[in-house]
Image (tube, rainbow, N blue to C red):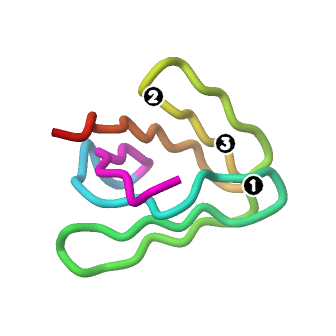
Amino acid sequence: MNVQRAYITGPKFDEVPGRMFMEPHVGDPLQLFLDDGKVLRTSVVKNIERHGSEIVVETQNSRYRVTLVPSA
């Protein structure tokens, strides 16, 4: 997977722009790089559901929705 632009929604934020460098995998933390320079690293991923350009990631502690932005 190439670097993918995305909007991230989670327990403390809504549609924050950022980038995803690799697809999430069960057993690993989800890691996203937000446009404000911060890195979001979650607890271990328990479940992943993909619906078109949307990925729903359930971790040990929270649930995140990552909406992928099509490349221009």
Q: Residue at x 15, y 39 (%)?
A: 72
**Label 3: how many residues lie within 10 Å, few (<14), some (14-19) or many (20+)?**
many
Residue at which label 1 appears:
60
Marks 2/3: CA–CA distance: 13 Å
- Single out the residue that lies furthest toward the top: 51
Q: Amino acid at mark 1?
A: Gln
Residue 36 point in image, percent of width and height: 18, 74
Q: Is residue 45 above or below residue 49?
A: below
Marks 2/1: CA–CA distance: 20 Å
- Single out the residue that lies furthest toward the right: 27
12 or 22: which is nearer to us?
A: 22
- Whether residue 34 is in magenta: the answer is no
- Whether residue 6 is in magenta: the answer is yes
Q: Is residue 56 above or below residue 8?
A: above
Q: Residue at x 44, y 49 (%)?
A: 11
Q: Amino acid at mark 3?
A: Glu
**Helix, strand or loop at mark 3:** strand
Labels 3 and 1 touching (C-beta < 8 A): no
Tag nearer the camera, 2 or 1: 2
Image mark for residue 54: 2
Q: Is residue 29 above or below residue 15?
A: below
Which contiguous range is marked in magenta?
Answer: 1-11
Q: Residue at x 54, y 18 (%)?
A: 51
Q: Residue at x 29, y 67 (%)?
A: 34
Residue 3 point in image, percent of width and height: 39, 60
Relative to residue 72, is residue 66 drawn left or right?
right
Labels 2 and 1 touching (C-beta < 8 A): no
Residue at which label 3 appears:
58
